[in-house]
Image (spheres, grey):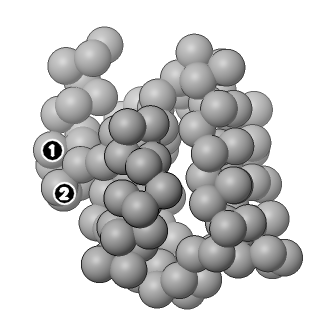
Amino acid sequence: MGDIAIVDFSGKITLGEGSATLRTMVRELIGQGHRKILLNLGDVDYIDSSGIGELVGAYTAVRTASGELKLVYLTKRVHDLIQITRLFTVFDVQADESAAILSFRSAS
């Protein structure tokens, strides 16, 4: 949407294919010049420690490229996991896609 890349994930982000997909997708977007990335996790039903590590890695890669990474539509399980790991202090989690898009624009 405009200069914001919106990526919808579904299923599991776990050791192996799930976390590799996340890593590859974010790196490709950065390589294509995208600096505003919104990850829709509404259909992600499980994230393991490897998946959390990949989310942190994605955040770091985007920040290193002078970009922003935001999360939207967290399921209860993912929300609880991010809260337990205290990653709410790291990630910009938005309530919905409209709020996330507005937060990108206001930060520009």
Distance in Å between CA atoms under marks 1 and 2: 5 Å
Residue at coordinates 15% horizontally, 44% vertically from top-left? 99
Does residue 108 appear left or right of residue 86 in this picture?
Answer: left
Quarter of the image with the C terminus in it = top left
User: Quick check: marks 1 and 2 in contact, CB under 8 Å?
Assistant: yes
Residue 26 appears in the picture as rendered:
yes
Location of mark 2 (residue): 96
Residue 39 appears in the picture as rendered:
no
Mark 2 element type: loop
Residue 24: % across, % down: 78, 54
Quarter of the image with the N terminus in it = top left
Does residue 87 appear left or right of residue 94 in this picture?
Answer: right
Residue at coordinates 21% horizontally, 31% vertically from top-left? 103
Residue 43: % across, % down: 41, 81
* Residue type for callout 1: Ala
Mark 1 element type: helix
Residue at coordinates 70% horizontally, 43% vertically from top-left? 57
Location of mark 1 (residue): 99
Q: Where is 29 relative to 66, above or below?
A: below
Does residue 46 appear left or right of residue 48 in this picture?
Answer: left
Residue at coordinates 58% horizontally, 24% vertically from top-left? 63
Decide which of 68, 76 is in the foreground and name it: 76
* Residue type for callout 2: Asp
